[in-house]
Image (cartoon, rainbow, N blue to C red):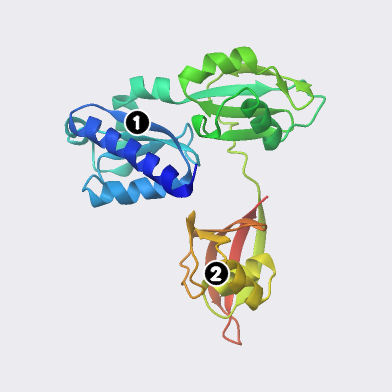
Amino acid sequence: MGTENTRDLFEARLEDAIRKCTSGSVAHIPFLTMRQRRRAERMLDARGLQDAYWFWGGHSTAERVCLFLLPDYLTAILPEDATAREAALFDCLAEELTDAVVSLSIKGSGFRNLSHRDYLGAILGLGIERDAIGDIAVQDAHSAILFCPRTLAGFLMGELTKVGADTVRCRECTLDETFTDGKQYRPVSDTVASPRLDCVVAALCNLSREAAQNAVRSGLVEVDFEPEERVDAVLTPPITVSVRGHGRFVLRSFDGETRKGRLRLRADQLV
C-alpha cells in the first residue's frame, strides 16, 4: 500500500474515533508508531481536542502506543495536575486498558541468546501484522516482554512456542521494578559549527558536511520521526534524529562553546 493510501487510512480511522468520542464513548486506536502519534497530535490539537486524548503502550517510555480519545464527561472530571491526571486516567479507563494493552512474558530455555529481531520474526511468522502489537522490550539475553491487545494474547500464549532456534514459554505477566524498556544507548560527543541539521548529521554519523547534506536532501533523515529535507533546519534539544543506514540518535544538548566558537554536542545513539 502506498504512503498516501496509508495516510488516508490512518486519518479515516482517526476520524471514526473522533466521531465515537464526540458521541459520548471512549474510543481507542492500537498501536501507533511515533510518526502516527505525531500526526494524531497535530490533527487532534487542530480540532481543539488537546485535552481529550491520551497515549499508553503498557509502560512509561513506550514507543508504540494506543491512542485513547475521551468524551467530554471524562475530560471534565480530570485534574489539571499532570501526575494526578495520569492516575485518574488509569482509574477511568481501567476496563478499556485491560483489553487494549496486555503484557506477556516470553522466556527462553536460557541456553540460547535471543534478540529483538528473533522475537519479532517469530511473532510475524505466526501471521500477526507489526501494527497489531506494541513494543517488544528485551529484558536480558533469554527473555522479553511483549505488549499486545487482549484479543491476541490468548493466541500468542498458545502458539508462540519457538523464537529463533529456542523453545519459549509465553505467559501473561505484571510488570515489576525489574522491568526495562530494553533500549541501550552509546554516548556520542563532538563539536559542530552550528545547530543546523546538516552539521548535526555530519557529527552524529561521522560524515562530511556534503555527504550529510546529500542524506538530508535525499529524504534519508527524520527529525522527531518526521521527514526533514531542509539542510538548514535548526535543531533544539532534546530531539530525535534518525538517519537511514546510520541509526537513531537522541540529541541531548549543546553544552556551551569551545574557544573557537563551536558548539559542544552531546547525544546518544540507540544500539
Q: Could you tell me which residue is drawn at 30 percent across and 29 percent down?
A: 27
The residue under label 1 is 28
Residue 242 percent across, percent down from the top left: 57, 57
Q: Specify the quadrant of the image occupied by residue 203.
A: bottom right
Q: Residue 265: tell me if it is visible.
A: no
The residue under label 2 is 217
Q: Which numbered disc, 2 or 1, marks the residue that appears first in the sequence?
A: 1
Q: Could you tell me which residue is drawn at 65 percent across and 23 percent down?
A: 106
State the CA–CA distance, disc 2 to disc 1. Answer: 36 Å
Q: Secondary structure at mark 1?
A: strand
Q: Is residue 55 left or right of residue 238?
A: left
Residue 215 percent across, percent down from the top left: 61, 67
Residue type, label 1: His
| Mark number, residue 8 | none
Q: Is residue 76 left or right of residue 263?
A: left
Residue type, label 2: Arg
Q: Residues within 10 Å of mark 2 (few under 14, many from 20)?
A: some
Q: Residue 158: tell me if it is visible.
A: yes
Tell me: residue 240, above or below residue 200: above
